[in-house]
Image (spheres, grey):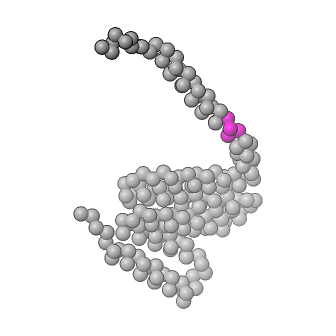
Amino acid sequence: MNKKNPVNSGIGLVALGVVFLAFQFINFDGFLVLPALGIGFIAWAFLSRKKGLLIPGGILSGIALGVTLSESALASGLGGNVDDGLFLLGFAAGWFAIAALNLLFFGETQLWPVIPGGLLALIGVGVMTDGVILDMLTHAGRLWPIILIVIGLSIVWKQYQSNEDADYVYEKSPEDLI
């Protein structure tokens, strides 16, 4: 019988309460808030064996990484929209971390976080290239009806092929029924 242990959830809530209380009295300059919360949720997920806690942990950690990258010397040295692109890439890494940590901690493959992570990474690279990739995606986005046309034609073709095979149907005569 697999029973959930409420003690782990209680410990997690106490830890979060202590962190939030400390933030009210100690000046952290806001730098460690997001990483602490992200790592806290990831640790809570690991200790309580609740994979749903990886979602806020990954998102908060990704935002923390994005903020750190966008304010780094690399971003200021390259100029342009690189800082915005680096933020989006860091945020995308947080979504990828949800899938990776789920596989690492729980042995289950969850691919749904890869979709928003991939989109954020693609947009981040597009922003970093001064919109060249975003312009290409805009033009490619106008051609999506071609996918519908191809799917529709394939359905019609398969139906046509199956009807061609159905022309040789054996028809029973009244004598066969006796």
Q: Is residue 137 magenta?
A: no
The prevailing secondary structure element of the residues shown in magenta is helix
| Front residue (pair 167, 7) | 167
The residue located at (61%, 64%) in the rendering is 66
The residue located at (54%, 25%) in the rendering is 159
Q: Position of residue 90 (x, y in %)?
A: 59, 61
Residue 156, image quadrant:
top right
| Residue segment shown in magenta | 143-147
Residue 83, image quadrant:
bottom right
| Front residue (pair 36, 72) | 36
Q: Quadrant of the C terminus?
A: top left
Farthest residue toward the left?
A: 1
Q: Position of residue 29 (x, y in %)?
A: 61, 81
Farthest residue toward the bottom?
A: 25
Q: Is residue 146 magenta?
A: yes
Q: Position of residue 177 (x, y in %)?
A: 33, 15
The residue located at (54%, 64%) in the rendering is 59
Q: Quadrant of the N terminus?
A: bottom left
Q: Is residue 36 above or below residue 81?
A: below
Specify whether residue 93 is in view: yes
Specify whether residue 136 is in view: no
Q: Position of residue 110 (x, y in %)?
A: 45, 53
Q: Is residue 65 above or below residue 116?
A: below
Locate residue 91 relative to residue 21 in the image: left or right: right
Locate residue 31 relative to residue 145 in the image: left or right: left
